[in-house]
Image (spheres, rainbow, N blue to C red):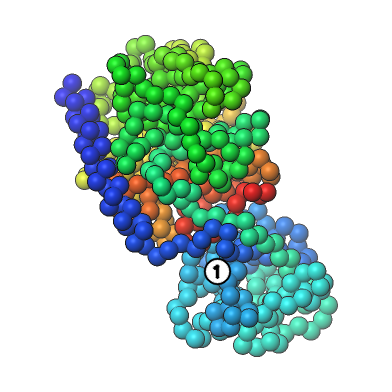
């Protein structure tokens, strides 16, 4: 009982601290250097003329061309006015703000701008018609117009051109877009625990933990948009208000929207428990959301938050973050089979507990947390990302569990756990405390996107804001989320937006 009271005390204290930090965090955010405005930049990728699907990317600072690049943003560059001459161009890395392509003794590298005249000259290039085809592009060195950027043995160098083969090696297909965006996607309110559902009606639907002036509010808000990048900038609609009495009057967190057998369900956390709402209307922003009760395991009705759905082998399963009376200071990931979208059957099974130091970081000492599970399935594998460490610290990050999609998910030995975070803060890109994510595919090109919240400051209790970025897949079939990007450099919006 004492431990449970301590847990409630921490929650109430957190509310107060969040309000204070909301003000401090925004002061930090707006005191930082201004981010590049969305839509102002041209972002480019350079594909080799004779190697379809091979793009320019960095490898240990030296540049090369490669296929199936992960993380994807290592092959994107912001086209800037030339550092040495505004009539020319310089190419800044999207993944590494302040780092530019540079001619370093006739080898193309990715180097940090030191502000020197020599750096500016070597990081400036002239775009000319492609030497092998005028429909493509070639790049001359600024300091010596006889030297061209070219591919040699998979790497990029600068050499004089002596024949037809050289001309092909020095020609690139330039893919460019001015449809860009920055992270976070919305800065007017703390929007933690973002969830996005892509429906067959052509719309994206979004939800998050609803706060006003940094304080948790007992309401659920929903967004609707045909564009993923603008989803959380649209006007949200309050679709449910918590009752005045009962188990779910406060601490309404982490809502998720799911469409099962032509019925909408929202799974949400309330008062340290998990509730379900139900709506049979075609559009979940309209109609009536009715209370379908609580989800809980009969013999273990304990702390249970951040629930999500897994469909595997034709059966429904529910995953959540929970604690046990025997181990009250530790949040673990549990799974249970569902007999219906509104009830569980059988016992709960523990899949993960915070066993690594990166899962145990708090504001002042150890804070053991595994929470916010999110399901991703790809090529016969089921991945469950989860958030580790305390949510209001810069150390909040993602771990990952993996099992075969045909395996029984109730057997713990069928799962393997990542030994280190698969997604974590980037001081370089100004995004900290990244976590509590969801996954969605772009409607226009089926590309994969991770939606997550991030803090714009390393300070504890800074506002948590919605961010999103594309991710790709490693050769072994695992997701590569890269590093958080998009605050100081723009990134492309989903195709067609």
SS of the residue under disc 1: strand
**Residue 324 pos. (x, y %):** 29, 23
Q: Residue at x 48, y 69 (%)?
A: 98
Give left or right: position of 16 versus 78.
Answer: left
Give left or right: position of 356 versus 179.
Answer: left
Q: Residue at x 61, y 17 (%)?
A: 261
Above/below status of 14 relative to 292? below
**Residue 276 pos. (x, y %):** 44, 19
Which quadrant is home to the N terminus?
A: top left
Above/below status of 289 relative to 476? above
**Residue 335 quadrant:** top left
Above/below status of 41 relative to 23? below
Closer to the camera, 187 or 433? 187
**Residue 333 pos. (x, y %):** 39, 29
**Residue 491 pos. (x, y %):** 56, 57
The residue identified by callout 1 is 92
Query: How many marks can you see?
Result: 1
- Residue 417 appears in view: no
Residue reaching furthest to the left: 2
Closer to the camera, 122 or 313? 122
Q: Residues within 10 Å of mark 1 (few under 14, many from 20)?
A: many
């Amino acid at each position: 009982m004492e431990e449970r009271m301590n847990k409630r005390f921490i929650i109430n204290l957190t509310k107060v601290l969040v309000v204070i930090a909301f003000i401090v965090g925004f002061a930090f955010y707006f005191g930082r250097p201004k981010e590049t405005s969305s839509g102002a930049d041209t972002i480019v990728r350079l594909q080799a003329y004779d190697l379809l699907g091979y793009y320019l990317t960095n490898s240990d600072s030296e540049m090369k061309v490669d296929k199936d690049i992960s993380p994807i943003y290592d092959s994107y560059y912001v086209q800037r006015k030339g550092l040495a001459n505004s009539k020319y161009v310089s190419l800044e890395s999207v993944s590494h703000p302040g780092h530019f392509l540079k001619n370093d003794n006739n080898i193309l590298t990715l180097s940090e701008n030191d502000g020197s005249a020599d750096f500016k000259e070597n990081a400036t290039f002239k775009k000319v018609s492609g030497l092998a085809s005028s429909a493509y592009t070639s790049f001359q060195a600024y300091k010596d117009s006889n030297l061209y950027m070219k591919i040699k043995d998979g790497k990029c160098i600068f050499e004089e051109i002596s024949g037809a083969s050289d001309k092909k090696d020095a020609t690139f297909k330039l893919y460019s877009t001015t449809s860009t965006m920055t992270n976070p996607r919305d800065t007017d309110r703390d929007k933690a625990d973002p969830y996005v559902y892509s429906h067959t009606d052509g719309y994206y639907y979004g939800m998050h933990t609803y706060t006003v002036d940094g304080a948790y509010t007992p309401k659920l808000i929903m967004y609707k948009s045909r564009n993923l990048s603008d989803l959380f900038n649209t006007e949200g609609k309050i679709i449910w208000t918590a009752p005045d009495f009962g188990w779910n009057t406060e601490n309404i967190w982490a809502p998720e929207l799911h469409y099962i057998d032509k019925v909408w369900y929202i799974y949400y956390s309330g008062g340290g428990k998990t509730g379900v709402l139900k709506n049979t209307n075609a559009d979940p922003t309209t109609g009536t959301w009715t209370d379908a009760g609580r989800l809980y395991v009969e013999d273990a009705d304990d702390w249970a938050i951040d629930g999500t759905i897994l469909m595997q082998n034709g059966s429904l399963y529910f995953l959540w973050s929970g604690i046990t009376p025997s181990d009250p200071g530790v949040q673990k990931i549990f799974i249970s089979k569902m007999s219906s979208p509104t009830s569980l059957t059988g016992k709960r099974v523990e899949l993960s507990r915070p066993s690594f130091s990166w899962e145990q970081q708090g504001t002042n000492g150890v804070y053991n947390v595994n929470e916010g599970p999110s399901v991703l399935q790809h090529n016969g594998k089921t991945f469950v990302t989860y958030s580790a460490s305390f949510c209001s610290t810069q150390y909040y990050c993602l771990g990952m569990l993996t099992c075969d999609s045909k395996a029984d998910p109730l057997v713990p030995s069928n799962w393997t756990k990542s030994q280190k975070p698969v997604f974590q803060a980037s001081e370089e890109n100004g995004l900290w405390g990244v976590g509590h994510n969801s996954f969605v595919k772009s409607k226009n090109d089926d590309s994969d996107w991770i939606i997550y919240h991030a803090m714009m400051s390393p300070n504890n209790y800074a506002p948590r804001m919605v961010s999103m970025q594309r991710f790709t897949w490693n050769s072994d079939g695992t997701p590569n989320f890269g590093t958080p990007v998009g605050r100081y450099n723009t990134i492309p919006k989903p195709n067609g937006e």
